[in-house]
Structure formats: structure tokens, C-alpha cells
Amino acid sequence: MEGIRVTVNGEVRDCSGTNPHTRLLDWLRDEGLTGSKEGCAEGECGACAVLVARPDGPDRSRWTSVNACLPPALAFDGQEIITAEGLGNVSNACTPEELHPVQREMAERGGSQCGYCTPGFICSMAAEYYRPERTPADSDTSDGATGPSVVGEDHATDHECGPNGFDLHALSGNLCRCTGYRPIRDAAYALETPPDADPLLDRQNRPAPVPQRTKTEQFSRPETLTEVLQALQDNPDTKLVAGATDLGVEVNLRHSRPTTTIAIDRLEELRTLRQSADSIEIGAALTLSEVERALAGRVPLLSHLFPQFASRLIRNAATFGGNLSTGSPIGDSAPVFLALDTRVVLASVEGEREVPLSEYYTGYRQSVRKPNELLRAMRIPLPLAESTAFYKIAKRRFDDISSVSVGIAMQLSDGVVSSVRIGLGGVAATPIRALKTEAALVGQPWTSDTAAAAAVVMAGEGTPIDDMRASALYRSAMLRQALLRFHAENAPALEVAK
């Protein structure tokens, strides 16, 4: 086995000999860094959060908060990590005897009680503290009012920014069970900009660590897509891992132990984002946060999705390629990509082929993807529909699994529905298109009567079931309500005037 090294809090540590199923969290704690805690073991509470230096373009890096309880430790070969223990010591803003500004504000404003969740909160807050785009707001939001939204006026409440520009939803993946969130918010909103002498700030001006070729008996990180495809050809049972937001849960809670795992999250061939005259191609291994920054609102329907997809901690690691490949009928991205008429690019040693996402799923967590293929990219055709929306019905507003999800993309011509695509999740064994509803809408005037009639059709789409998240009757009712809401939000001016 070749030497595997991980830089933690500025110190290079040997990770060689680590079991391929050992999570980063467990390895850190075995190394004596017990600040990171395990709460849920599935990426929902954030007690395990750490900072990782990730690429921010070719010449810069970005301190990114991720859950340490999900990815394998070996996936961080050659990478740089900061934990809550090292945050103050590494920063030039303080000596080893002093606190980092984030730690100091949390302590002075009573942001910690039992302290179990505090290290995770501090790492997520530090990532936002160093976020390059963070700038003080013009308006006073000390009462909790919301600042400007990056996803449009309809979703302004999804980004609550303080007077210092701190986006409170950077903490959406961190849960506190005893302190209460007001003092934590106060600490976040009290943070100033990092001093120029802070080495963690300066570190972002240099490239992120390059991916290391890692090779053990059960875990590897090849350097090229060709190597990965050949490995799949030789062993179709190989498990591919990018953000590990799904596989990590399988390992933790269902004790899954893949015999062979290949990390693909840093393959350049899977991290492209290209726009041509007729499509936008999104690489399967780009994280959701990276896609959100790169698109900068160019695909409004995806902009509706981002704030509702899990939490910032998850979006910093999760990929659209992974979310679509798992085939979950309640995965948030599938209804949106169905509404966008997306085609997925499947690659193997035999070449590439495109498949419409509407024809991709064949059954519960099953698809047309062959064992020797991987999902390389998603292609969204252009031009985009003018009216779009994504509705997620769940028990919690953020960081929850949906009971029903609906993606809608509609084009009107002189008040008549010229085209419409509706993707549904949570109402069948697979994500589906609402084909009957689409047929009921196309060619009809976009009026309240048309919407009401089509909403009745929509309530009958799919084969919803009763389970712990919702009843079949409730799911059908939510489908109907989603189309009525879409009309209320996208009614033609004449209709509103009436």
C-alpha cells in the first residue's frame, strides 16, 4: 500500500492502513481530534462538520464545510482539513491561547450550552466567515429580516443575511437541541470580515490540493475516467463514490461493506459545466454548491431547487450524478430534471450514449444504466421555458425528505400553453412525468378554468402509497394543489385583472 497522507490543522498525518470503510469522523477521533461528534450518522445534524480546502477555480481554493460522518477517510488522501480544535491555532488572527473570531463570538454570546453540536456549528460558521462573496448588507436585518436572495424574489426567505452579509442558511445542516438558535444567530451576525493577515483567508488565494492517485486493495482514486471505466468493465460490482451522502448512510446505518470502492469526485472529465447554443451540460461529479455558483441563476428551475435540497453541508458534497443514479423516487433533483427535459450521458469503455431522463428509470432504484456504465453528465436543452417552479412538500421546511415534489416548466404563446413538462417525485416507484396532465394543458388557454381542470387530472397521476411520511390521499391532494399554486403564481396579466 502506498503512503496515504492527510493534512489536518496544518500537520501532515499518516492515514495508511486505514480500513476503507472507516469514515473521516472516526479516523479524526482515533487521531485524538475528538471535537467532531457523531449525532445522527446520516448527515442531518452537522455535529461532525469540518472544513476542507476545495477548488474554487484553477487558481483559488475555498474552505468548504462538509459532514465528516459520511465520506471514507481514504478519500482525503493529500487533502487539507481544519477541525474545530485547529481553527484558532491555524489562524493568524490569534495565538494558540486565543479563540478564533467565530469561537469567540459563540462563547461571548451564549451560543453553546451542552456543547455537543458546537464544534460543527463553528466549522460551518467559519466556512461562511471565509466565503469570498460575503459582503455587508445595506439594510439592517438585526430583527431577523431577510436580505437579498440569490434565487429570486419568490424565494427571498431562503437566504437570510445579517448586516454583515452572513447567510444564516449556511447553518441549515446544523442542529442544536438545547441552546436555542437566537444566540447562535447573534454570534453569526456579529462576525466582522477576516483580517488580511489571517492565513486561512490567505490560503484561499492558492489552488486547492491536487487529487492524489490512491490505490489500496478495496479503495482507489484513479486519475482518469478511462481507468474508472475499465475498472467497471472488469468488475461491474465496483461501487462508485463522489460525495458519499448516500453511500455513507448505507455504510453507517445498514452496515453496507462494498468489496471495491472507487472515488470519482475529483475526475476532471466529470466536473465540466459547458453551455452551447442548444444545451447546458453539467458534469456528474460537480457538487450542488459548485453548480449553483457556476450557473449563477442561468437555470431558474434549478435555482428554485438548490435552497430546498437538503442542507448546505450536504450540497457541499452531494452531486446531481449521484442523486439521479441512486434512483430514489423521492430524490429532489429528478422531478426538476424531468421538467427540464434533461438527457443523461452514460459512459463505458464502449463509448457514450444519451438517454432521456424520462426513459431512464425502469423500476424502484432501477434504470437502463448497465453495470459497466456510469452517468457522466446531464444535458439540459435550450432554450428554457419561461415559467418554472419547484414545489417540495415535507414535514420540515429545510433539510428533510420530501413527501411529494413537483417540477414544472411551461411555455405560453399568446396566453395559450404551447408546451409544458411536469416532473413528479414521491407518487410512484420511480420519478415520473405527469403525461396526462401535460396533455390536458397543451393547446389550452392558461386560465383558472384550465388549471382547475388539469389539477383534477394531476391528482390522479402516479400510484401514491400510504407510508410514514404521508398518506396516498394527501399526496394526491398535494399534486392538485401544486398546479393550482403554479397558476396563481404564473397567471397571465389578463387573468389577474379579472
Image (cartoon, grey):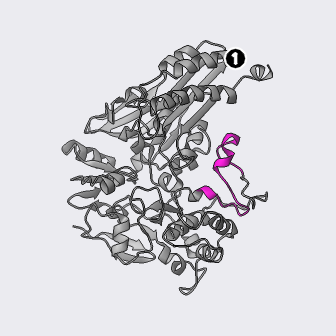
Left-right relation of 204 to 70? right
Let me know if residue 377 is in the magenta part. Answer: no
Q: Tell me what residue is drawn at x 77 percent, y 23 percent.
A: 496
Residue 44, horizontal then vertical, whole percent? 46, 55
SS for dot 1: loop
Magenta stretch in the rendered image: 148-169
Left-right relation of 219 to 328? left
Q: Residue furthest bottom?
A: 97
Q: Which of 41 and 349 lies nearest the eye of the viewer?
A: 41
Left-right relation of 150 to 16? right
Quadrant in which residue 361 is drawn: top left
Q: Which residue is mark 1?
A: 415
Residue 116 seen in render: yes
Q: Tell me what residue is drawn at x 59 percent, y 28 percent.
A: 481
Quadrant in which residue 382 is drawn: top right
Q: Which of 352 and 183 lies nearest the eye of the viewer?
A: 183
Residue 446 seen in render: no
Q: Which of 415 and 349 lies nearest the eye of the viewer?
A: 415
In this view, 340 is above or below 254: above
Let me know if residue 154 is in the magenta part. Answer: yes
Q: Quadrant of the N terminus?
A: bottom left
Dot 1 surroundings within 10 Å: few (below 14), some, or many (20 or more)? some
In this view, 49 is above or below 243: below
In this view, 364 is above or below 497: below
Residue 28, horizontal then vertical, whole percent? 37, 71
Left-right relation of 117 to 78? right
Q: Quadrant of the C terminus?
A: top right
Residue 393, horizontal then vertical, whole percent? 54, 38
Callout 1 amino acid: Gly
